[in-house]
Amino acid sequence: MNALPPLAASQTRPPAARRLHVVTWGCQMNVYDSGRMADVLAPLGFGPAASAEDADMVILNTCHIREHATEKLFSELGRLRRLKEARAAAGTRMLLAVAGCVAQAEGAEILRRAPYVDIVLGPQTYHRLPEMIAEAEHGGRAVIATEFPPESKFDHLPEAAMPAGGVTAFLAIQEGCDKFCSFCVVPYTRGVEASRPAEAVLAEARALVAAGAREITLLGQNVNAWHGDAPAGGEWNLARLLRALAEIPGLLRLRYTTSHPRDMDDALIAAHGDLPMLMPFLHLPVQSGADRILAAMNRRHTGADYLRLIERLRRARPDIALSSDFIVGYPGETAAEFAATLDLVREVGFAQAYSFKYSPRPGTPAATAPGQVPEPEKEARLAALQALLAAQQQTFNASLVGRRIGVLVTGRGRHRGQIAGRSPYLQAVHLDGPESLIGHEIEVTIAAAGPRSLAGERRAANEEHAAA
Ligand code: SF4
């Protein structure tokens, strides 16, 4: 996209209340990005719409990782096209934008197949949405912005707005990836690794806490590779940033995701031992337990490296629980290599995990690699892995029954008189209690464990320990 002229002052003022509906697919980074796009558009008068039917603008924030991402997008676009046409027949205009990683990877194709789309924008350009809307509305043609601009979008975003009372919040500190795993589109759709300066991260964290956040999850495609400018010159690593964030008054909990095993350095492992507010739950993707497959994936670590890392983390923080990502049926994966993945899972014992069948992503090296595994075989392997992971998750959840753990109360429960919260291990916890506990971390006895959530009991005495 060519550089667009800056908006005239009159264009930046809210012309009238308009309604925005953002549909988010994919990872937490996309959830964060959707929120920031809404922040960017708020000064133009856009407020939230409950559905596309109620909206003056719809943004589809897409994810390229999952299977059938493109088909899913075009099917949703077909539905929105009918809505847009009905709106036009009634004399009003609905703007339609496609954002995120599918937009980045297939922008021209989107406009070829769906010429009624007004704006296509990649993840690096959403700070320019106001300009793009002006061009789409007044220029009468579709706008495409999928370049990697030299300036960081983070330098141009307004302060993050958080709904009042939101107890947990995401904070993006890093974006992009230089690892080039052979199955992954992220380095192509999100660009090279870029870290936000520490001061910008600290300022956003302080603003989130002032707005009510008690738990912050730092986000990045490769978050533990973060190395940002330090406030007083020089550079900090993630461990140093976590130590600075831990000093913010009112902040009770910290997490970070997603990490690469190669970037788990000594300082970060030590931080897990030293910072009680750094939650004892780490998502650390391994993808496979077979060294030949890990090499083919360009992961640059072995199964043994991963196991050593887990051992060091457990030495630093004995109660740490682990989560991971797995791909089964990577091109050339033999039955013995899949068995090595199962062995690694048994050895680690995961509290939770995500697992997928390999599916080719156009443009990635693995997409054209020989030895594509037949679909039925992939399905059988995935079923076996998921059965093992589900059993481990159930075992982990059951191990908490009878124990007292800290629960951060995040909101009302499903039923009257119930509240809901988060365990240190990111499980949902339901219990009886007053809404006045929302935003507090309380001690809860776990009474029962389901596959994905826990039931807790609060004792009157525990309320006295509620943290402010
Ligand atoms: S480290 Fe993660 S984001 Fe980066 S290329 Fe590998 S899988 Fe993709």
Image (cartoon, rainbow, N blue to C red):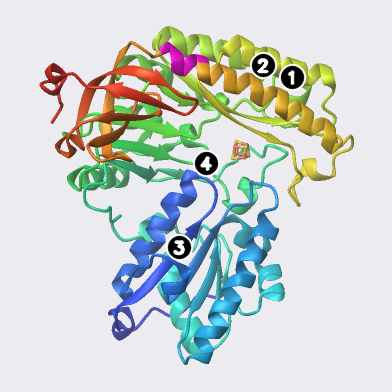
Q: Position of residue 136 (x, y in %)?
A: 51, 82
Considering only order in the chain, which callout, 4 or 2, is on the residue closer to the N terminus? 4
Residue of label 1: 290
Q: Is residue 27 visible?
A: yes
Q: Is residue 358 left or right of residue 458?
A: right
Residue of label 4: 221
Give the number of the mark in front: 1 or 3: 3
What amino acid is found at the position of numbered circle 2 in the picture? Gly
Per the model, the C-alpha gap separating discs 2 and 3 is 40 Å
**Which residue occupies the foreground of this view, 408 or 98?**
408
Q: Quadrant of the C terminus?
A: top left
Q: Residue at x 30, y 40 (%)?
A: 415
Considering only order in the chain, which callout, 3 or 1, is on the residue closer to the N terminus? 3
Residue of label 3: 22
Considering only order in the chain, which callout, 2 or 1, is on the residue closer to the N terminus? 1
Q: Are marks 2 and 3 in contact (CB under 8 Å)?
A: no
Per the model, the C-alpha gap separating discs 1 and 2 is 6 Å
Q: Is residue 219 left or right of residue 11?
A: right
Question: Number of marks in the image?
Answer: 4
What amino acid is found at the position of numbered circle 3 in the picture? Val
Q: Position of residue 448 (x, y in %)?
A: 38, 19
- Give the crowd class for mark 2: few <14, some 14-19, many >=20 residues within 10 Å: some
> Per the image, is 435 magenta?
no
**SS for tag 2?**
helix
Q: Is residue 295 left or right of residue 172?
A: right
